[in-house]
Image (spheres, helix red, strand yellow):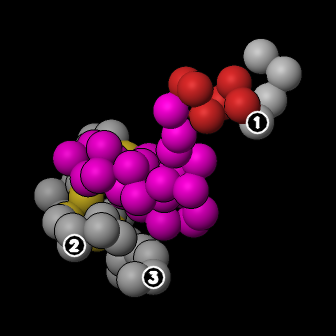
Amino acid sequence: MHYYPYTDGFDSDRAVCCCAECGCEIYADDIIYRIDGEPICEECLPEFAEGYFAAQRMTGLRLLECSQY
C-alpha cells in the first residue's frame, strides 16, 4: 500500500493520511512511525515490526554460533 497524504489543505478535524497497514485514519495529533516512507500507526507497529524484522530473528545460541559475541 502506498502513502498518499491528503492534499486539499490542513483541517485539524480531518485525517492527515491513513495507516499503510490497517488503513485507519491518522490525525494531526496521532503518533505514527514512518517506516520506508510509509505511515504505520502505533497499534500496527508490533505486528509490522515482527514481519519486517523476521529475517533477523534468531535464538541467542544462533547468535553465538554466527558471531564473535
Q: Quadrant of residue 10?
A: bottom left
Characterize the local packing of mark 2: few (<14), some (14-19) or many (20 or more) Cα atoms within 10 angstroms.
few
In the rendered structure, which segment of residues is drawn in magenta? 33-59
At mark 3, the secondary structure is: loop
Residue identified by numbered label 3 = 2
Q: Are marks 3 and 2 in contact (CB under 8 Å)?
A: no
Amino acid type for the residue under numbered disc 1? Cys
Q: Residue at x 36, y 56 (%)?
A: 48
Q: CA distance from mark 3 to mark 2?
A: 11 Å
Residue 51, position in %: x, y? 41, 58
Labels 1 and 2: the sequence-earlier one: 2
Query: What number is the disc on residue 54?
Result: none
From the viewer's perspective, is 14 left or right of 48? Answer: left
Amino acid type for the residue under numbered disc 3? His
Query: What number is the disc on residue 23?
Result: 2
Residue 60, position in %: x, y? 55, 25
Closest to the observer, 51 or 15:
51
Closest to the observer, 64 or 36:
64
Q: CA distance from mark 1 to mark 3?
A: 36 Å
> Which residue is the extreme one toward the right?
68
From the viewer's perspective, is 14 left or right of 54? Answer: left
Residue identified by numbered label 1 = 66
Residue 51 part of the magenta-drawn span: yes
Amino acid type for the residue under numbered disc 2? Gly
Q: Which mark lies nearer to you, 1 or 2?
A: 1
Residue 15, position in %: x, y? 23, 64
Q: Which mark lies nearer to you, 1 or 3?
A: 1
Labels 1 and 3: the sequence-earlier one: 3
Q: Residue at x 36, y 77 (%)?
A: 6
> Taking 8 as reference, is 52 above or below it?
above
> Taking 66 as reference, is 7 above or below it?
below
Q: Is residue 28 visible?
A: no
